[in-house]
Image (cartoon, helix red, strand yellow):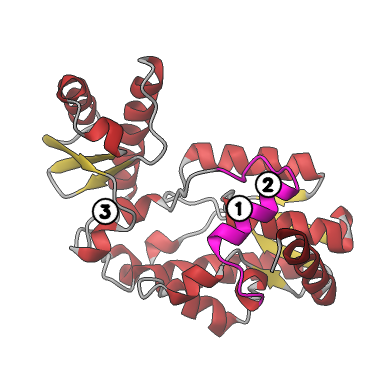
Amino acid sequence: MDTRTAAERLVEHLAGIGPVAVAFSGGVDSALVLAAAVRAVGPDAVLAVTADSASLAAAELTDAVAFADRLRVRHLAPATAELDNPDYAANGRDRCYFCKSTVLDTITAVAREHGLHAVATGTNADDARDPFRPGIRAGDEIGVHTPLRALAMTKTDVRAVSRHWNLPTSDKPAMPCLASRVRYGLSITPARLARVERAETAVRAWLADTGTPTRDLRVRDLGDTGRIELDPHLAHRPEIAPALTEIVRTAGFDNAEITLFRSGALNHE
């Protein structure tokens, strides 16, 4: 379908749901759901809820607050305690299931405290086909709404409608949680997540300051080694390697390596 039709159908779908709390990470998908909900039922009938946990980068929470304010939507950021769950902290391949169960239980409770019985997430049609998304099952078990998935909207569709509505998130790179940077089997701890965030933030800042910004960037925690993943135009530039290696070591890793960015790389290792 064309972009205008997709946008109209999304608003109609949210109107059918009615007053809603949106699980709002600050990313492009949940931002579109939030914007559509506002168009459908008005800002006073919408609540944006961002799970504030150790796995959420501070910059993402800042962006979420600004976006909700732009839409004049109430925004809450309750603390979540997924790290207290040993099944999550063990960091097996089903880690996201335990994370989403905790996060969505918290968001659902917050929604009900504010008189809302519907919760929606930004799960899209591409997510539903991804075999590495056990968190989707958690949402289905809790009974949350997934408007983008219900309308078969892909990430491409999401970005197209976001541009159609002039949302500032339309071209925002994917920014999954910090735990997704940690190799499976390595325990998830606040210190480990903070180290990843510290390293990634510092690498991004150095690249921006030297006029060589990168769109897709990850620092993966492989244990003693921090692996920097960069866009192709930077990954093979040897002159930046010494600086980035030193940055990652300063952040707390014993060693560092640089390679090409690959989305979900740890899922294939």
- Residue 7 coordinates in the image, percent (x, y): 76, 61
Q: Amino acid at mark 2?
A: Arg
Q: Which residue is mark 1?
A: 159
Image quarter of residue 67: top right
Q: Is the Cβ of the residue at disc 3 closer than 8 Å to that at disc 1?
A: no
Q: Callout 1 environment at 10 Å: few (<14), some (14 to 19), or many (20+)?
A: many
Q: Is residue 47 magenta?
A: no
Q: Which residues are magenta?
A: 151-171
Q: Nearer the viewer, residue 221 or 160?
A: 160
* Quadrant in the picture for the C terminus: bottom left
Q: Which residue is mark 3?
A: 182
Q: Callout 3 environment at 10 Å: few (<14), some (14 to 19), or many (20+)?
A: many
Q: Residue at x 39, y 17 (%)?
A: 211
Determine if residue 1 is in view.
yes
- Measure the alpha-carbon separation of dots 2 and 3: 32 Å
Q: Is residue 171 left or right of residue 120?
A: left
Q: Secondary structure at mark 2?
A: helix
Q: Is the Cβ of the residue at disc 1 closer than 8 Å to that at disc 2?
A: yes
- Measure the alpha-carbon separation of dots 3 and 1: 28 Å
- Residue 15 coordinates in the image, percent (x, y): 84, 71
Q: Which residue is mark 2?
A: 163
